[in-house]
Amino acid sequence: MKLVHHLSPERVESMARNGQAIVVDVRESSEYKQGHIPRARHIPLSQLVHRLKEVSKSHTVVVVCQSGNRSARACEMLQQAGYTKVFNLSGGMNNWKGPVER
């Protein structure tokens, strides 16, 4: 089991704004619609395994959920699938202070 690496909301905001990372939101549709990080790709955790081809292995991937628990599981799934640059948004959307799209 690889260690899941966590990034602060400030770091994720800067990486997302500068195009340094793909943000994948693994929450359910109802949660995503209530507000998400701009340009985040919505792939619910239950669908992640079937939709891996939508996420490039060559990019840095930051995974987001509401509190950080589901996204930590998603990070482990991505690592098992061969993704090497995977990070979890520490504290999830509960800690996010950056811009939000609805």
Image (tube, rainbow, N blue to C red):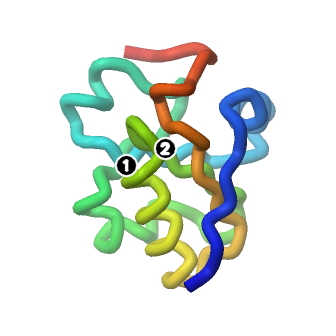
Could you say where residue 22 lies in the image, as x and y percent from the top left?
62, 48
Disc on the earlier residue, 2 or 1: 1
| Residue under the point 69% across and 74% down | 84
Of residues 97 and 91, the one drawn nearer to the viewer in this rendering: 91
Dot label at residue 26: 1
The local secondary structure at tag 2 comes to strand
- Callout 2, which amino acid? Val
In the rendered view, does 54 fall on the left or right side of 98? left
In the rendered view, does 49 fall on the left or right side of 5? left
Could you say where residue 34 lies in the image, as x and y percent from the top left?
29, 19
Could you say where residue 19 lies in the image, as x and y percent from the top left?
75, 38
Callout 2–callout 1 Cβ contact below 8 Å: yes
**Image quadrant in which the C terminus is located:** top left
- The quadrant where residue 97 appears: top right
- The quadrant where residue 59 appears: bottom right
**Image quadrant in which the N terminus is located:** bottom right
Up the image or down, 67 lies above or below 10; here it is below
Of residues 17 and 90, the one drawn nearer to the viewer in this rendering: 90
The residue identified by callout 2 is 64
Of residues 100 and 65, the one drawn nearer to the viewer in this rendering: 65
- Callout 1, which amino acid? Val
The crowd level at tag 1 (other Cα within 10 Å; few <14, some 14-19, many 20+) is: many
Dot label at residue 88: none
Could you say where residue 11 lies in the image, as x and y percent from the top left?
77, 35
How far is disc 2 from disc 1 in space, using C-alphas?
6 Å
In the rendered view, does 28 fall on the left or right side of 17? left
| Residue under the point 52% across and 61% down | 55
The local secondary structure at tag 1 comes to loop
| Residue under the point 46% across and 26% down | 94
Up the image or down, 68 lies above or below 99; here it is below
